[in-house]
Structures are given as structure tokens and as C-alpha cells.
Image (cartoon, rainbow, N blue to C red):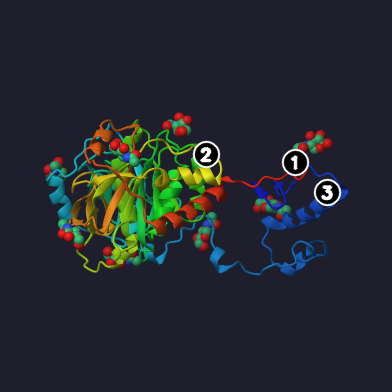
Amino acid sequence: MIFQWILLTFGIRLTTPASISVTYSKNLTTQEEVQNAKEEIVHYVNLNETVNDISALKTEANKLYNSHLNDIEDALFDFNSSHCAVEEWNNNRTDSIPHEDRHKEWANQNLLNRKYLYHDSFSLLAAFVYTDQIIVTLTAENKFNQTVYCRYYDCHRKEIPDPFKTSVFPESTVFCARRPGAKYISISKTTEEQAELPIPIVPRIENPPHYFTVCMATLYGDEPKFLQIVDFIEYYKLQGATFFHIYLRNVSNYDRVLLDDYVRTGDIEIIKMHDHFWRDDFMWHNAQINDCHHRSKFFSKWTAVIDIDERIEMRSESFKTIISLLDSIRDPNIVNLHFKVQWVIKGSDTPAEYVNEKELIDEIIFHKYQNTSQIGGFWNQPKCIIRPEKIGMMTIHAPMTTYSGLRRSLVNETIGVVRHYRNVEQRVFAGALERMMVHAPFNIYPIPKWIDELLTDAILNRVKWVYNVVDVSCDKK
Ligand SMILES: *[C@@H]1O[C@H](CO)[C@@H](O)[C@H](O)[C@H]1NC(C)=O
Ligand SMILES: *[C@@H]1O[C@H](CO)[C@@H](O)[C@H](O)[C@H]1NC(C)=O
Ligand SMILES: *[C@@H]1O[C@H](CO)[C@@H](O)[C@H](O)[C@H]1NC(C)=O
Ligand SMILES: *[C@@H]1O[C@H](CO)[C@@H](O)[C@H](O)[C@H]1NC(C)=O
Ligand SMILES: *[C@@H]1O[C@H](CO)[C@@H](O)[C@H](O)[C@H]1NC(C)=O
Ligand SMILES: *[C@@H]1O[C@H](CO)[C@@H](O)[C@H](O)[C@H]1NC(C)=O
Ligand SMILES: *[C@@H]1O[C@H](CO)[C@@H](O)[C@H](O)[C@H]1NC(C)=O
Ligand SMILES: *[C@@H]1O[C@H](CO)[C@@H](O)[C@H](O)[C@H]1NC(C)=O
């Protein structure tokens, strides 16, 4: 039996205890260091024996380094490698999924049967456990109504042999029953076949930790993003949002530094959109909406489902921010606030990098672009704020079905409107410019002064913190 203890603290490796061969991962230079290392080794020779007499170890040589020897292990760490902790909340088994009949009904109506792209795997994206079910989101969009099995795995990713038969519904979604100790999950067509790599099951068991959060549609494309990202996040923070789910296909390394700083401060989670199959960047939208819908259930009471270039704007004296409007809603049947859109002509790209304060202030989107259209109709690319757990199926512009409550509650445009900055370059969607121009006449329409001031400050502070890195003189370096 060969013990290979890698003692990281000292960078020393012992091989067989019987014949101790010692290699040093760092080069010991001085005699003193060599001597110290030898004293350390002495303490570990006995590792393969049970230590009966702790006091015997408290030799003169030991004192300097190991003067605090314990008799018993901390209860929290009194486990070995074969142990899987099962938290109380995870000691739960269910035999069915909620709303099963309604899902069947909707499936038989073929609701949102997309048959989109050509995936030949389910392509698991994420999984969440709620008190009454586990929801798995997929990036495949061509598995509608397929019979599948949920496969469960413990903390060591060892399968818990108790699969659950269910189906893919809605598209890109699998509702699974719960299994005690399940930490990872996968999906397969049969119980025998090898399932694709399991993914972690993220708990959504506690009381919802947030009141208002935002889902940002997938970031991609060559337009520089840092200024749009910081504007988006700081704007919605002023509106009362406390967390953002940001979907990422690709941004420049420069822009990524800003996103990562928002991860550092706990404002955002980045969800990378990638799977084993080809798709053009804009084709991630459905999968993103679906994932964020389920991800936000029991995570937040209200969730806005919007794009990087959209700002839901409050227009009345009674409700100055989004959360003040949300706070006024007591009727549990209001589960989707539907906002109309007003377009702003965005004549050029935002800058690629921070140069100085003055330039940034000029380039800030709501300073530079204010030429605004009339308000569009009910179905002109509306956006919404939803109660995620009440919604059955979500699409880009509105919910398709609800479990309870009214499918649509239109927000009067005197209360709120989406300000949609439309880049005239039309990188992806040909015809978008004409569709915007239909909503003429255009007029200069700035954002409210109080938001302008607070937002300008917030943007400057964040951008300077992230990009205006303090340099030092050569001699200090
Ligand atoms: C360590 O354990 C092995 C196997 O049990 C034994 O053969 C060996 O003598 C032990 N070494 C020491 C130094 O006690
Ligand atoms: C350690 O130092 C010796 C003598 O200077 C040198 O030959 C050897 O390459 C060094 N080993 C490592 C791992 O740096
Ligand atoms: C790990 O601990 C458990 C419970 O104390 C025990 O049954 C098992 O034999 C231990 N396994 C190993 C490899 O030591
Ligand atoms: C969905 O699957 C069920 C069960 O396999 C089947 O009865 C039903 O016809 C299917 N519906 C559609 C629209 O394919
Ligand atoms: C366990 O499952 C039951 C049945 O769905 C549910 O009512 C209960 O809240 C669950 N408990 C936990 C801690 O998830
Ligand atoms: C990702 O973005 C960078 C920088 O904009 C670009 O050079 C690269 O080609 C993009 N990669 C993909 C896969 O889109
Ligand atoms: C606003 O846009 C319209 C339509 O393109 C244009 O005719 C008008 O001159 C613009 N107004 C300003 C102040 O730029
Ligand atoms: C929107 O609110 C305004 C002002 O209160 C009111 O005049 C108008 O009738 C409302 N529109 C609808 C569709 O309710």
C-alpha cells in the first residue's frame, strides 16, 4: 500500500512511509531551511499509524510549528471521502410534477412546437430544484413532447438508480420529480442509455431572495458593449433591481473585465450560451428566455425580460421607479406587466474603451441619443415584467400561458414605456430600421433629470473603478 501525501503547506512529498523518500518542490538553499524541513518531516512519519498518545508528539521540535494539537476532529469535518451529505431540504422524494395535466393539454395544442435547429442531444443548460419539482433547461429546441427520463446523481456524481419518466415540455424544458440526495441531473431517452454529462441542481428552496431582477438577452456581436452594459445595470439598479442574469455568447476581453467586476460585487450571474451544435449568435434568444424564466422562479418576485438596448422608463409622478409601480400591485392575478415601446435612433456605436471622463459623459447613450419615436402599438415588440412562477410558457415578448392570473396587464403609457435604442446599422435584423421609422414623427426626448444625474455618476464611478487603473512609476515597479 502506497501512501502519497502531498503536503501543500510545506511543499514536501512523502512516498512510502517505510522508506521515506523526500523530494522538495522548491529548492532549499540555506542550511537552516534544510534543517527546518527535516524537523517538519519528523511530524509526518507517524501518519500511517494511529496516534494514541498525542502528548508524545509534543516534542521539543514540534512545539514551534504544531503547538495546538487537537484530540478530536471538528464535527463538521468528521467525514471521509465516501460520505455524501444530504441536507434536510434535499431529503425529499416526489412521484409527479405539478400541473402535469395542463402541460399535457398545452402539448396537445402544440404550443410553441419550434422544431428549431438540428440538435441530436438534449444539451442541458441548467437545473433548479424547487420544493415540488426539479426543472431542467435545455438549449436544444427540437425535442418537443419527447418522452425522456430524468437521471439523478449524488454528490459524487454516482447515479441514484431511480429515474423519472417525463417529457420535454415546454420546448427546451424538462420537469422532473425530486429524489433524496440528488445533486446532479441528466436526461436520456431510455433508462439504459448513457445520459449526457450531468449538471448541478441549483437550489430554489428558500424564500425568494429578490424582489425585482432582470434577465438580459444574450450578448454577442462586434459592437463595443462596456458602456451599454454599465448603463443597463446601473439604470435598473436605480429602478430597484437587485440582481441580473446576463446571458453571454461573446464580448471583447475589454468588455468582459467589466462583467467580471459585476460578478465580483454580486450584482450579476453570467450564463454562457454554448453547446455542441452550430447556431448563429442571434439564435440563442428562445433558449435564453426559457432558461431565465425558470431560473428566476422563486428567485425573485418580479423579473423583467429585456435586451441590452431597452430601458423600461417610468413616466408618472405617482410611480417614479419600477419598484414603486410593483409595490402598488396587490392583486395576485397580475402576473405580467406588458409595456409598449418607443424607439430612439442610435446613429453610431458606443466607444470601445474608456478614454476620459469628458468623452464618456458625451458618449453616454442617454446623452448622445434622444431622438425618439411615437409609442408603438400593443404588439410592436413589447417587453414585460413577469411573476416567473405564475407563468407556464414564456416567449420573447410575452407569456404564452399562465398557471394562474391574467395573461396580460397592459401598462398605460402614461405610467411606463420601454425606451428602445435602435442602432441604425442593422447588423442582424434587416428591415428593423424601416420598422422603427414607421413610428415617426421623432422628437428630442431626454430622460428625467434626476435619473440622468444619478446614472451619470454611477456609470462614471464604475467605469473609472474598472478601467482607470492606477499606474505607478517605474522605480516603484
Ligand atoms: C505503515 O503501514 C504499512 C502498511 O500497513 C506498514 O507495512 C509499515 O510498516 C508502516 N510504516 C511505519 C513507519 O509504521
Ligand atoms: C536547485 O538548485 C540546484 C543547484 O543550484 C540546481 O542544479 C537545480 O536545477 C535546482 N533545482 C530546481 C528544481 O530549481
Ligand atoms: C467512511 O466512513 C464511513 C462511516 O463512518 C465508514 O462506514 C466507511 O467504512 C469509511 N470509508 C473509508 C474508505 O474509510
Ligand atoms: C405528445 O406526446 C403524447 C404522449 O406520447 C402523445 O399522446 C401526444 O399526441 C403528443 N402530442 C403531440 C402534439 O405530439
Ligand atoms: C418536500 O416535498 C413536499 C411535497 O411536494 C413539499 O410539500 C415540501 O415542501 C418539500 N419539502 C422541502 C423541504 O423541499
Ligand atoms: C468574439 O468576439 C471577439 C471580439 O469582439 C471577436 O474577435 C471574435 O471573433 C468573436 N468570436 C466569436 C466566436 O464570435
Ligand atoms: C430625428 O429623426 C428624424 C427622423 O430621422 C429626423 O428627421 C430629425 O431631423 C431628427 N431630429 C434631430 C434633432 O436630429
Ligand atoms: C391612460 O392614462 C391616461 C391618463 O390617466 C388616460 O387618459 C387614458 O385613458 C389611459 N389609457 C387607457 C387605454 O386606459
Q: Is residue 98 left or right of residue 243?
A: left
473 or 183, which is in the foreground? 473
113 or 53, which is in the foreground? 113
Identity of the residue drawn at 40% across and 37% down: 220
**Res. 353 mark:** 2
425 or 385, which is in the foreground? 425
SS for tag 3? helix
Specify the amino acid type for callout 3: Val
Count of residue discs? 3
Q: CA distance from mark 2 to mark 3?
A: 51 Å
Residue 154 appears in the rendering: no
188 or 220, which is in the foreground? 220
What x and y, as percent, mark residue 257? Answer: 52, 44
SS for tag 1? loop
Residue of label 3: 34
Which sits earlier in the primary sequence, circle 1 or circle 3? 3
The image quadrant of residue 206 is: bottom left
Which sits earlier in the primary sequence, circle 2 or circle 3? 3
Specify the amino acid type for callout 2: Glu
The image quadrant of residue 24 is: top right
Q: Is mark 2 within 8 Å of ligand 6?
A: no
Identity of the residue drawn at 86% across and 51% down: 32
Residue of label 1: 474
Q: Is residue 253 left or right of residue 120?
A: right
Q: Is residue 388 left or right of residue 259?
A: left
Specify the amino acid type for callout 1: Cys
Quadrant containing the C terminus in the rendered view: top right
Check the image and report above or below for 283 versus 132: above
SS for tag 2? loop
Which sits earlier in the primary sequence, circle 2 or circle 1? 2
- Of badges 1 and 3, nearer the viewer stands 1
